[in-house]
Structures are given as C-alpha cells and as structure tokens.
Amino acid sequence: MSVNVEGFESGPFFELLQGALVDEPTKKQAIKGVKAVIVLTLKNKDGKTQSWVLDLKNDGTVATADKVPKSDVQLILADEDFVKLANGEANGQKLFMNGKLKLKGNMMKATAIEGVFKKLDPRSKL
C-alpha cells in the first residue's frame, strides 16, 4: 500500500521509510530502539490534514490513517516542517519551542524519532 499521499511533500520520505523497514534486521533495530507507535499528523499548504502511523512497537510498518489511532505519541506539524525535520534541516526541539510542533503523549518516545529517521534513511548511506 502506498504511503505517498498527493499534495504532501513528505510522501516520498514515508516511502523511503517503508522501504527501509522491509529489511528484517533494520526493522528489528528500529522496534528495539523506539518501542512505540508514532502517529505523524501533517497539514499541507492547502490546509489538508493526513496522518501516518509508524508502528515501531509491534510489526515495524508505516501506513496512512484516516482517523488517528491509539498511539504512544502523536506529532502534529506542517508538512513542510516535517520535511525539514526528516532531512535534518530543522531541529525537533526548536520546532516544538516555536510552537510549530505539537505533541500528544509520551514526549520521551518523540525524542527517539529523530534518531530513527537518521538510521532508517537510505539516503544517508549513499
């Protein structure tokens, strides 16, 4: 199932993440490192909202969700800010302090996310 949603710049990044989690050792490492279900709810420039569920607790998957499911932590931010965060151009703490990133749930789990992005991003290995 495609995790690339039309109108969102972050779609290709979720596809990279989904592709990285196909590798069994990578998936196990991600689950071991995070142990959380993370929901990313992004708002694009057109004002549309979309949620993605990163299950890094049970089965190591990435999927889109129409309704926000029960999770350990939910991050709510603009699509463009997420792209900057994922590319390492923005700092999660600064986004949070500036009110551009909202958190619901376990803040400690949220801090583990940045490390996972760096480990799972296949572009960093090029």
Image (cartoon, helix red, strand yellow):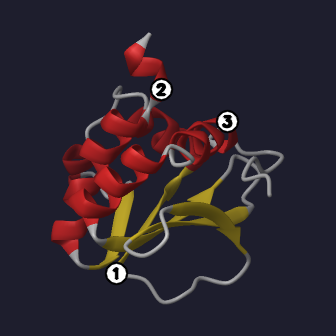
Q: Is residue 63 above or below residue 22?
A: below
Q: Nearer the viewer, residue 113 or 22?
A: 22
Q: Secondary structure at mark 1?
A: loop
The amino acid marked with disc number 3 is: Pro
Mark-to-mark CA distance, 3 and 1: 24 Å
Residue 72 got which mark? Answer: 1
Mark 3 lies on a secondary structure that is: helix
Residue at 20%, 57% in the rendered image: 111
**Residue behind mark 2:** 122
**Which residue is situated farthest in the right direction here?**
6
Q: Are marks 3 and 1 in contact (CB under 8 Å)?
A: no
Q: Is residue 114 above or below residue 124?
A: below
- Tell me the quadrant of the picture where the N terminus can be found: bottom right
Residue 4 relative to residue 106: left or right: right
The disc placed on residue 12 is 3
Tell me which label, 1 or 2, sits earlier in the chain: 1
Task: State whether residue 43 appears in this view.
Answer: yes
Instruction: Residue at the far top: name it.
Output: 126
- The Cα–Cα distance between marks 3 and 2, rounded to whole angstroms, is 12 Å
Name the image quarter holding residue 126: top left
Q: Residue at x 25, y 62 (%)?
A: 32
Disc 2 marks a residue whose amino acid type is Pro
Q: Are marks 3 and 2 in contact (CB under 8 Å)?
A: no
Using residue 9 as the reference point, say whether residue 87 is left or right of it. Answer: left
Query: Which tag, 3 or 2, sits closer to the chain's start?
Result: 3
The outermost residue toward the front is 24
